[in-house]
């Protein structure tokens, strides 16, 4: 009986989440969607009960789906401890975000469509986490990417929003090349592409590097991080859901799923470690240099994702997963509190023009402070149980010394920008317009952020005891290693307090900053040369090879009786019509499949 609980639970959760989509045009659709997610959350606790009391983890339910000449694909659900633990976390966070969205999108004409997109976004992420083979994983992977494009570009009438949505898609398409490369390799080796079957093989290094590239683009690692800050152009609920439990953690979750392949390859682990350490350090520096409240929180997400990548690099995927779960609570709360503050201050996002909100918005600022303390890794809050464990594991692991130093410095920087946020928002006297009517007494807002605040306080302890066994192996370490994370956090806290007091009297004007910490400068230095080189190379190929070889040489023999040159034929095929391109694509795929079948 207990072996069927996970399968029954996931079926009930999916049916509950899909049911509101049948009545999208109903005026009560936003409320029905919130209630459906709330109900699904309580249903998901059944599977969690099964995991904690009977240790029923792995359930691989397979139904034949696609049976062709090149694959034997099955509809497979892999409901292990990771999927069981992530399910209630994602549903709880989404429940709070949807309740906040009812207030935030109240005056939007398309609020039903917005809520539908958020719900599908959640379903895509749950598909990814519970997939039993690479094909189902790919559906969830692309579903998350597609919904992020639609939601980031929600205000598509604004150029910045449309550009941010396109930027997110383009960055993720780079990673999709690596994902598809790995997907094709697994399909070639194992037609069923099942996780449990594929674990008997050892993929080559370039396949694993392709998976790491896919995860790096989705999880905004160094060199692929600019899209994450640009995604702030979307509505605040989108930012909260995207940064907490869906889009950005999909890449880390992919590497957690693929860890049985990664752990035997030292090159792959070293790549994860160095990439994660560089990301957590650089993103923390960017957060220090920003004054936009949403961008500071966004870069803090990138920094925490780098810390998760470090955990994978040191061979601790369970710690990376633990940080995914704990991070979801306080990061969603930080974004929702930011949205409430921005709304009450007449869309003001510069923290230097805030201040004194602890008297005007006591609940919001209290929850924001709790979230910032959890982000720092303050003892006994949610972030402490995962962040401190990762740094302790890194301290006693045989890892690159520079990677450890960068991670510890990033920990101090996290305390600096977190306390800077709290200081500029809550303390001292108000700097905002005195004519503004600040009012936080909205039931959906208070319910959502209070619920997440409670999660930020107690979720770390609960998830920690569920994730780890009851009798773990006890390791001893020097006191300075044990206290290193807390000491660096304390140093950062003291530095932030002194700097904030020193700079409070300065007027909120834009000052010159180092180009190293300017995101726009990064785009110019890193991206423009790549784009320019690619375009120049393409132009050289077209002009020299196409004109010289095809037109001047081949056309004399092949096209001697025709007045149409090869260039004109190619030009005519580029009509700009999507239907024509799709028809060509499907025709080509059909031809390739027939060719493979005949061979």
Image (cartoon, helix red, strand yellow):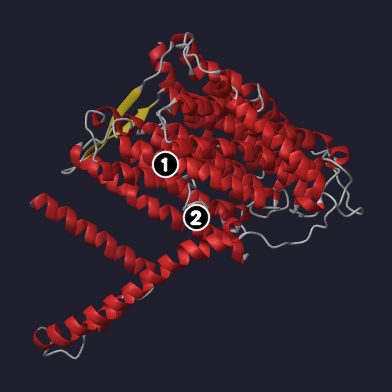
Q: Nearer the viewer, residue 197 or 286?
A: 286
Q: Residues within 10 Å of mark 1 (few under 14, many from 20)?
A: many
Indicate the secondary structure of the residue bearing disc 2: helix
Indicate the secondary structure of the residue bearing disc 1: helix
Looking at the image, residue 435 lies above or below residue 103: below
List x then y, in percent, for residue 82.
44, 26
List x then y, in percent, for residue 320.
48, 30
Task: Spot the residue most to the right.
Answer: 435
Task: Residue 257: name its quadrant.
Answer: top left
Q: Nearer the viewer, residue 9 or 280?
A: 280
Q: Nearer the viewer, residue 510 or 501?
A: 501
Q: Residues within 10 Å of mark 2 (few under 14, many from 20)?
A: many
Q: Is residue 279 left or right of residue 62?
A: right
Which comes before the other along the chain, label 1 or label 2? 1
Q: Quadrant of the N terminus?
A: top left
**What numbered label is drawn on residue 168?**
2
- Label 1, label 2: how far apart the Cα atoms are: 17 Å
Q: Residue at x 31, y 35 (%)?
A: 266
Q: Which residue is mark 1?
A: 140
Q: Is residue 454 left or right of residue 409?
A: right
List x then y, in percent, for residue 477.
51, 17
Looking at the image, residue 530 lies above or below residue 77: below
Q: Badges 1 and 2: C-beta atoms under 8 Å apart?
A: no
Q: Is residue 247 in view?
A: no
């Amino acid at each position: 009986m207990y072996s069927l609980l996970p399968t029954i639970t996931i079926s009930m959760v999916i049916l509950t989440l899909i049911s509101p989509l049948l009545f999208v045009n109903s005026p009560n659709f936003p409320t029905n969607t919130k209630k459906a997610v709330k109900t699904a959350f309580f249903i998901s606790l059944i599977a969690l009960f099964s995991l904690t009391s009977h240790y029923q983890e792995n359930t691989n339910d397979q139904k034949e789906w696609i049976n062709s000449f090149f694959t034997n694909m099955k509809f497979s659900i892999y409901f292990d401890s990771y999927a069981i633990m992530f399910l209630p976390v994602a549903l709880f966070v989404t429940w709070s975000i949807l309740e906040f969205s009812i207030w935030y999108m109240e005056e939007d004409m398309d609020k039903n469509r917005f809520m539908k997109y958020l719900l599908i976004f959640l379903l895509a992420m749950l598909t990814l986490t519970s997939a039993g083979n690479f094909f189902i994983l790919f559906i969830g992977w692309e579903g998350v990417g597609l919904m992020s494009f639609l939601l980031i570009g929600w205000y598509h009438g604004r150029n910045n929003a449309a550009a941010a949505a396109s930027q997110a898609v383009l960055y993720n398409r780079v990673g999709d090349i690596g994902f598809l490369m790995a997907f094709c390799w697994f399909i070639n080796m194992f037609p069923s592409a099942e996780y449990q079957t594929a674990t008997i093989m050892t993929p080559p290094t370039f396949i694993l590097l392709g998976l790491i590239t896919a995860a790096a683009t989705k999880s905004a690692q160094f060199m692929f991080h600019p899209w994450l800050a640009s995604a702030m152009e979307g509505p605040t609920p989108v930012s909260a859901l995207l940064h907490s439990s869906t889009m950005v953690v999909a890449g880390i979750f992919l590497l957690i799923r693929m860890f049985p392949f990664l752990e035997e390859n030292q090159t792959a682990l070293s790549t994860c470690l160095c990439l994660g350490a560089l990301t957590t350090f650089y993103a923390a520096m960017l957060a220090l240099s920003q004054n936009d409240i949403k961008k500071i929180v966004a870069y803090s997400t990138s920094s925490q994702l780098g810390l998760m990548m470090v955990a994978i690099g040191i061979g601790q995927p369970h710690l990376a997963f633990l940080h995914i779960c704990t991070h979801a609570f306080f990061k969603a709360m930080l974004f929702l509190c930011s949205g409430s503050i921005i709304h009450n201050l007449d869309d003001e996002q510069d923290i230097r023009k805030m201040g004194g909100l602890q008297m005007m918005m006591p609940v919001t600022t209290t929850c924001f402070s709790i979230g910032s303390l959890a982000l720092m890794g303050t003892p006994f809050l949610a972030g402490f149980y995962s962040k401190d464990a990762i740094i302790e594991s890194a301290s006693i692991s045989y890892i690159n010394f520079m990677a450890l130093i960068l991670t510890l410095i990033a920990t101090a920087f996290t305390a600096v920008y977190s306390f800077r946020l709290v200081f500029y928002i809550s303390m001292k006297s108000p700097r905002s317009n005195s004519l503004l009517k600040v009012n936080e007494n909205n039931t959906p807002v208070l319910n959502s952020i209070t619920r997440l605040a409670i999660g930020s306080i107690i979720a770390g302890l609960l998830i920690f005891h569920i994730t780890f066994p009851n009798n773990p192996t006890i390791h001893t370490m020097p006191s300075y290693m044990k206290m290193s994370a807390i000491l660096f956090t304390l140093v950062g806290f003291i530095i932030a307090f002194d700097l904030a007091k020193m700079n409070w009297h300065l007027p909120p004007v834009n000052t010159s900053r180092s180009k190293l910490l300017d995101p726009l400068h990064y785009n110019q230095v890193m991206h423009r040369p790549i784009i320019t080189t690619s375009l120049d190379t393409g132009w050289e190929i077209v002009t020299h090879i196409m004109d010289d070889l095809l037109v001047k040489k081949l056309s004399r023999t092949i096209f001697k009786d025709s007045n149409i040159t090869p260039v004109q034929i190619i030009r005519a095929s580029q009509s700009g019509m999507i239907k024509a391109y799709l028809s060509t694509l499907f025709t080509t795929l059909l031809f390739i499949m027939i060719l493979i079948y005949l061979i």
